[in-house]
Amino acid sequence: MTRILRAIGARTVDGIWRMGFAARFFAAILMRSGTSFARFQLTIREIFSTGVLSLIIILVSGFFVGLVLGLQGYETLQRYGSSDALGILVALSLVRELGPVVAGLLFASRAGSALTAEIGLMKTTEQLKAMDMMAVDPIARVVAPRFWGGVISMPLLAALFSTMGVFGAWFIGVVFIGVDDGAFWSQMQASVDFRYDIVNGVIKSVVFGFAVALIAVFEGYDSAPTAEGVSRAITRTVVNSALAILALDFVLTSFMFRGNG
Amino acid sequence: MSVSFPSGDTLVDVSSVDFAYDKRPILSGINLRIPRGKLVAIMGGSGCGKTTLLRLIGGQLRPTGGTITVDGQDLTKLARKDMYALRRRVGMLFQFGALFTDLSVFENVAFPLREHTDLPDDMIRDLVLMKLHAVGLRGAHKLMPNELSGGMARRVALARAVALDPMLIMYDEPFAGLDPISLAVVGQLIRKLNDALGASSIMVTHDVHESLEIVDYIYFLSGGKVVAEGTPDEIRASTDPFVKQFVNAETDGPLPFHFPSGSYRDALMEGRP
């Protein structure tokens, strides 16, 4: 019993230490972000590798989520004779929730894991130490551009995910099932509020971008410099990012949508 | 053994340095000097603290006691900015080269020049080709690090380490994992570059025969202490048991074969490791 309690205590203390390190690491990234913007081509390169290279999975997933939403939404709405509201249902689901959350989860799996692996392997092969010995700060030169690349990519990917989702729902609902085209778009236009729905969705995706990018670069930088260490760090990135996204989503939703939307 | 401390103007002075990871002591009471223009080897068995000492001299670790001065500056008191200013005049070759795997050979060597100078591209190109020519790899400038052999990677890393014409070059196990020809090539390059650049060099290695051919002075480390030192001739003639064991690669001597442990008899009798 004592051993179990001790193990729980040790894990808790370790977790708090790591959160403290992550907070200090975040502060260090912010303070050393000058290079990322003064030499913006460094950040653009990272936007390419985290954002552009994630496009396929985001677009395809968005389309399929839209198809499923269209089918499920139509199935329920037609029972109440309101299948014309399919556009509203799909758009609100995607813009408010599914777009930022699912895109965030996919982003963590595709780009976050790659970021962790890249930084972890640079650490394992002493590239970060070599850079530091060359008087080039690895946080400024390697970590910060990757962090900002992730932060900038995430809301753009979430927006594309939602767009593809709406298109997928239109495709299945209007083209295949026969929901009225004009009703689909006009009801969506009339009911989706820019400030209340879209801006809040964008805020969510920005927050998730910060969380996933920070977790990914921190886990890579903090990984044990061995093959096993990097592998564990990648797992932690995916798991912690998913938990962070879902927890933050609940917190943000409870602040943003207070029942009269 | 008789000691002839290297004479001349001192570039690196390590004085009474102690270092411990957590509470586990790694180095204790280390004293050594690196004179300007000389190539000095720090030798010892695996795990004796050689690389730790190199990292202390490079300012990547802070000693728990004692002082380290490089070019008159006390590393223990330097702020980060001043440390970086000092490191711009120091080159380091890592054990396996530590080349940036996403950059070509050319861009690896150009990296310190692009980061620390405002030189125009054509001048950077000329400088990079000169450095690569010096290590015999000008023709490999387009290759990526994963296309290089171990010896070639080490030479590219050497070109990168001297890109800014440093006053001090540090080598961490430069001969590890090299075939005999690459080993001799890298050894000769280390000597030639030190002399051609007018630099000073510290080489951490356990390759005793190659080192005796090229270095000016040797410090032997064991158990976190300097246990012997001297010029290559003094080392060859030494009757010190540690030096003899190391130079002649003898299995029997003051360097223990076994990692410290309890009684073998007790371990067998009690069924515990």
Image (tube, helix red, strand yellow):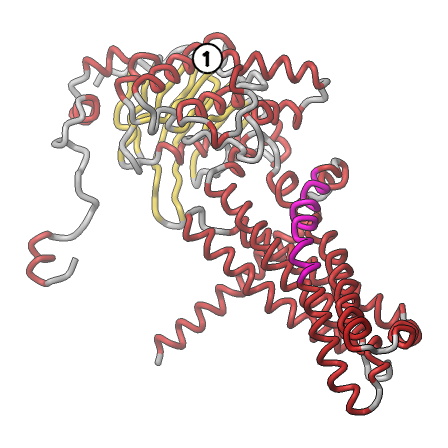
Q: A1 or B150, which lies in front?
A: B150
Q: Quick one: label 1, few (<14), some, or many (20+) residues within 10 Å? A: many
Determine whether the residue tagged by mark 1 lies in a helix, strand or loop: helix
Q: Residue furthest top?
A: B196
Q: Number of numbered discs present?
A: 1
Q: Quadrant of the N terminus of chain A?
A: bottom left
User: In which quarter of the view is residue B250 placed?
Assistant: top left
Identify the residue at horizontal 64%, vertical 16% (top origin). B125
Q: B201 or A97, which lies in front?
A: A97
- Which amino acid type is shown beneath numbered disc 1? Asn
Residue A97 lies in the magenta stretch = no
Q: Is residue A181 left or right of residue A249?
A: right
Q: Whole-percent x and y of residue B115? A: 66, 28
**In the displayed structure, would residue B42 be above or below residue A256?**
above
Q: Whole-percent x and y of residue B206? A: 29, 27
**In the displayed structure, would residue B98 be above or below residue A153?**
above
Q: Inspect this view and state whether residue A203 appears.
A: no
Q: Quadrant of the C terminus of chain A?
A: bottom right
User: In which quarter of the view is residue B131 placed?
Assistant: top right
Q: Which residue is mark 1?
A: B194
Identify the residue at horizontal 77%, vertical 73% (top origin). A176
Q: Whole-percent x and y of residue B214? A: 34, 12
Q: A222 or B69, which lies in front?
A: A222
Q: A45 or B237, which lies in front?
A: A45
Magenta part of the chain: A42-60
Q: Chain of mark 1?
A: B
